[in-house]
Image (cartoon, rainbow, N blue to C red):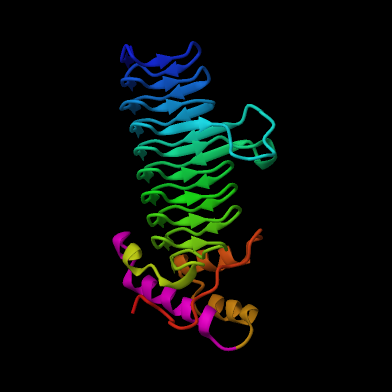
């Protein structure tokens, strides 16, 4: 049977696995599912049509599954889906989706969400992400796997952040960020390749070199951007990481690609 502190409130209809722990003063709504190994430390609020994946731990004053902060939300039974093995620290907020945005906010596995982060309605957040304190992603954003958002950073609604990218602290990102890029500043600009992140994930040195060469050619090469894309594809497209960058650039998007800083080619030097 779930271990539920006597001060907690678990509504009729909530589905709790047998080994779930619900700590003091937590609130669990009637349409919530807490899967095996989930722990609510204390004072956590889980509401709405929300599923929390296996072994995820939720710390005090986090509020998950509350209605989207959107004027056009009409009160529909939209969802929040949170993956397995996530750590959700104090004060984090994650909203359900909207009817016009697909109806689902989705967060992947093994995410680490530090204090007071926010995941807005209809976002799709990948696996193995790190959101430092007070990082915020606006509605309909797409955040790839292994992305790191620095403290107090913000991602504009409808933006896409490619896999392995890192957004520096205090940065504001208004456009789409190619995979494996570094972003810094307000407004945010590309400042090079996330070499440290790639090495931590044990990418081969050859791949790191190919991504850096592709970055330089794409943003600082000669000729029109379209031609540079084709050139990079021919020279480096056989590399899986570079192929991800090319596919990202060629994909349809709501926002334009985030440009680089012009005063410094590559901070990873």
Residue 229 lies within the magenta run: no
Q: Main secondary structure of the magenta part?
A: helix
Identify which residue is drawn at 56% across, 34% down. Answer: 96
Note whether 32 is above or below 188 in the view shown: above
Picture coordinates of residue 141 (x, y %)?
Answer: 56, 51
Pick the residue in front: 235 or 116. 116
Picture coordinates of residue 85 (x, y %)?
Answer: 35, 37
Picture coordinates of residue 56 (x, y %)?
Answer: 36, 33
Could you tell whether 205 is left or right of 72 in the image?
A: left
Identify which residue is drawn at 40% across, 43% down. Answer: 116
- How many marks the image carries: the answer is 0
Q: Pick out the residue farthest to the bottom.
A: 222
Note whether 160 is above or below 211 in the view shown: above
Identify which residue is drawn at 43% across, 82% down. Answer: 264
Which image quarter is the C terminus in? bottom left
Residue 200 lies within the magenta run: yes
Q: Where on the picture, by quarter, is residue 100?
A: top right
Which image quarter is the N terminus in? top left
Q: Where on the picture, by quarter, is residue 231?
A: bottom right
Pick the residue in front: 163 or 27. 27
Note whether 57 is above or below 245 in the view shown: above
Picture coordinates of residue 138 (x, y %)?
Answer: 55, 49
Identify which residue is drawn at 38% across, 22% down. Answer: 26
Which portion, as a residue range, is magenta? 199-222
């Amino acid at each position: 049977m779930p271990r539920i502190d006597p001060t907690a409130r678990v509504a009729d209809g909530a589905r709790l696995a047998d080994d779930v722990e619900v700590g003091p003063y937590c609130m669990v709504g009637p349409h919530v599912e807490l899967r095996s190994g989930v722990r609510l430390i204390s004072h956590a609020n889980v509401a709405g049509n929300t599923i929390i994946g296996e072994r995820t731990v939720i710390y005090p004053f986090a509020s998950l599954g509350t209605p989207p902060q959107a004027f056009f939300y009409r009160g529909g039974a939209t969802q929040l889906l949170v993956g397995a093995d996530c750590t959700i620290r104090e004060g984090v907020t994650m909203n359900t989706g909207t009817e016009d945005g697909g109806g689902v906010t989705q967060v992947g596995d093994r995410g680490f969400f530090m204090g007071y982060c926010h995941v807005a309605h209809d976002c799709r957040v990948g696996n193995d992400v790190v959101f430092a304190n007070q990082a915020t992603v606006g509605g309909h954003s797409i955040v790839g796997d292994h992305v790191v958002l620095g403290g107090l950073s913000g991602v504009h609604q409808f933006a896409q952040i490619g896999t392995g990218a890192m957004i520096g602290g205090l940065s504001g990102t208004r456009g789409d960020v190619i995979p494996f890029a570094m972003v810094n500043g307000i407004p945010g600009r590309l400042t090079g390749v996330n070499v440290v992140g790639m090495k931590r994930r044990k990418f081969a040195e050859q791949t790191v070199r190919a991504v850096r060469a592709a970055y330089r050619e794409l943003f600082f090469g000669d000729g029109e951007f379209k031609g540079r894309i084709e050139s990079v594809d021919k020279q480096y497209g056989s590399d899986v990481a570079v192929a991800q960058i090319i596919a990202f650039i060629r994909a349809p998007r709501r926002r334009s690609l985030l440009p680089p800083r012009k005063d410094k080619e590559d901070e990873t030097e």
